[in-house]
């Protein structure tokens, strides 16, 4: 891989940073140690540091040589997951019930590596904003940073993010223009009926019976209401009811995860869930309250910025390792909030080899250190191409 020689020389440093972060995982909005480590390194390299953005987010500002007003933003997420690690290597988590099982430690180390290189060489004309984001894992840290004035205080002509992908061969690059990851919403449907003795169901309005019908009806949304070439998921993941084998309960509750690729499909699914709940409530003589929460929008890559980052990545990994039509993914990412506020692109960097193949969010996952120099070189190349010195 034609990674930058200077970045390759700092590989051991990046690996050490990554291992340190892995040993000290922090959950959503708890990333105080991580943020302090990031801020200290940026300051040591002469980079202007701003802390506490979106609660625990950090932004580093680095100006190149020249007078250009062009700007670029590069984002890495910092938070870990509430998961017990099952690895036994030296850099395993030291905190019970918390681990870096999604590779955010690697993303942070990659961006730090790029920041160090760019601060030393400053072979660009313009301004780079290094965005270290908290709370990606369900906390909406991207949204929090945007609402905290991220792009007002640090304007970006384009913003870019990456995610490691253990399902792709090490050093490969996958991206697509337009929607690449789904929106993520939740619906909690509380059914209130009339309970009673299990021997006399005719004297009750059984919320379990209504819940079973509701579960079945929800499956028809994707199967019969969404076009076959559209992409959506409605998964009921919790069904809670009852306290005794001879008691028909007063209440039942269903919870669902909803995914969609377009805003139109997202809106339709919500309205359809509400309609189904109204109909089943009338049929069974129960009340159904729907708490529908919009979580993350879909990740939509902008055409110009996708081409920009693909050009930089191609120089590093080679055109033979590029996939510009990667399949869409029904997972979600809160980088979507940044892409709603600023043009940009989100892509995947392959990490799979003979020793790194566990999927993200698995208790035996570990980021593949062999891609640290590759990722940092892509960021460096992107900056130098987009902010060239005259």
Image (cartoon, helix red, strand yellow):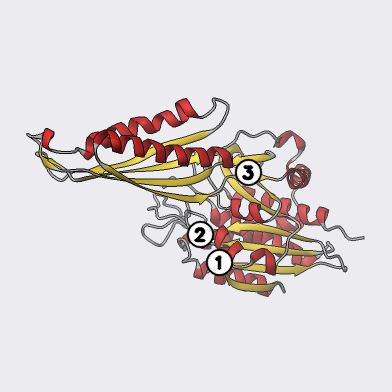
Circle nearer the N terminus (1, 3)? 1
Which residue is denoted by mark 3 in the rendering?
A: 348
Q: CA distance from mark 1 to mark 2?
A: 9 Å
- Label 1 close to label 3 by CB (< 8 Å): no
Q: Report whether 228 appears left or right of 131.
A: left
Q: Is residue 201 above or below residue 94?
A: above
Q: Secondary structure at mark 1?
A: loop
- Image coords of residue 82 (percent x, y): 40, 55
Circle nearer the N terminus (1, 2)? 1
Q: Residue shown at 53%/60% (left/top)?
A: 141
Which residue is denoted by mark 1 in the rendering?
A: 54
Q: Residue shown at 83%/61% (left/top)?
A: 124
Q: CA distance from mark 1 to mark 3?
A: 25 Å
For the C terminus, give its image quadrant. Answer: bottom right
For the N terminus, give its image quadrant. Answer: top right
Label 1: how many residues lie within 10 Å, few (<14), some (14-19) or many (20+)?
many
Which residue is denoted by mark 2 in the rendering?
A: 135
For marks 2 and 3, give the one nearer the viewer: 2
């Amino acid at each position: 891989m034609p990674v930058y020689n200077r970045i390759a020389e700092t590989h051991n440093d990046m690996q050490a940073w990554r291992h340190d972060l892995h040993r000290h995982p922090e959950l959503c909005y708890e990333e105080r140690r991580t943020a302090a480590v990031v801020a200290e390194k940026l300051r040591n390299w002469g980079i202007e540091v701003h802390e506490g953005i979106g609660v625990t987010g950090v932004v580093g500002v680095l100006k190149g040589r020249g007078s250009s007003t062009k700007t670029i933003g590069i984002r890495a997420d910092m938070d870990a997951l509430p998961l017990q690690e099952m690895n036994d290597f030296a850099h395993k988590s030291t905190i019970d019930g918390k681990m870096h099982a999604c590779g955010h430690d690697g993303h942070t180390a990659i961006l730090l590596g790029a920041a160090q290189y760019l601060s030393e060489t400053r072979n660009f004309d313009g301004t780079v904003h290094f965005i270290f984001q908290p709370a990606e894992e369900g906390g909406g840290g991207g949204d929090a940073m945007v609402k905290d004035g991220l792009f007002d205080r640090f304007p970006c002509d384009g913003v870019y993010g990456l995610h490691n992908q253990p399902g792709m061969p090490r050093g490969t690059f996958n991206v697509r223009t337009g929607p690449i990851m789904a929106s993520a919403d939740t619906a909690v449907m509380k059914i209130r009926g009339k309970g009673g003795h299990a021997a006399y169901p005719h004297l009750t309005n059984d919320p379990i019976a209504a819940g079973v019908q509701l579960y079945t009806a929800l499956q028809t949304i994707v199967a019969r209401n969404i076009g076959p070439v559209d992409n959506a998921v409605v998964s009921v993941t919790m069904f809670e009811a009852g306290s005794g084998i001879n008691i028909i309960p007063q209440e039942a509750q269903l919870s669902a995860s909803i995914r969609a690729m377009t805003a139109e499909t997202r809106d339709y699914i919500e309205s359809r869930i509400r309609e189904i709940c109204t109909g089943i409530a009338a049929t069974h003589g129960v009340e159904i309250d729907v708490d529908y929460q919009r979580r993350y929008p879909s990740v939509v890559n902008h055409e110009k910025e996708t081409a920009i980052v693909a050009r930089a990545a191609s120089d590093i990994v080679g055109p033979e390792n590029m996939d510009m039509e990667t399949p869409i993914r029904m997972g979600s990412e809160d980088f979507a909030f940044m892409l709603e506020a600023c043009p940009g692109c989100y892509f995947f960097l392959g990490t799979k080899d003979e020793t790194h193949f566990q999927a993200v969010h698995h208790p035996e996952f570990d980021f593949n250190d062999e891609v640290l120099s590759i990722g940092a070189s892509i960021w460096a190349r992107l900056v130098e191409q987009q902010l060239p010195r005259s």
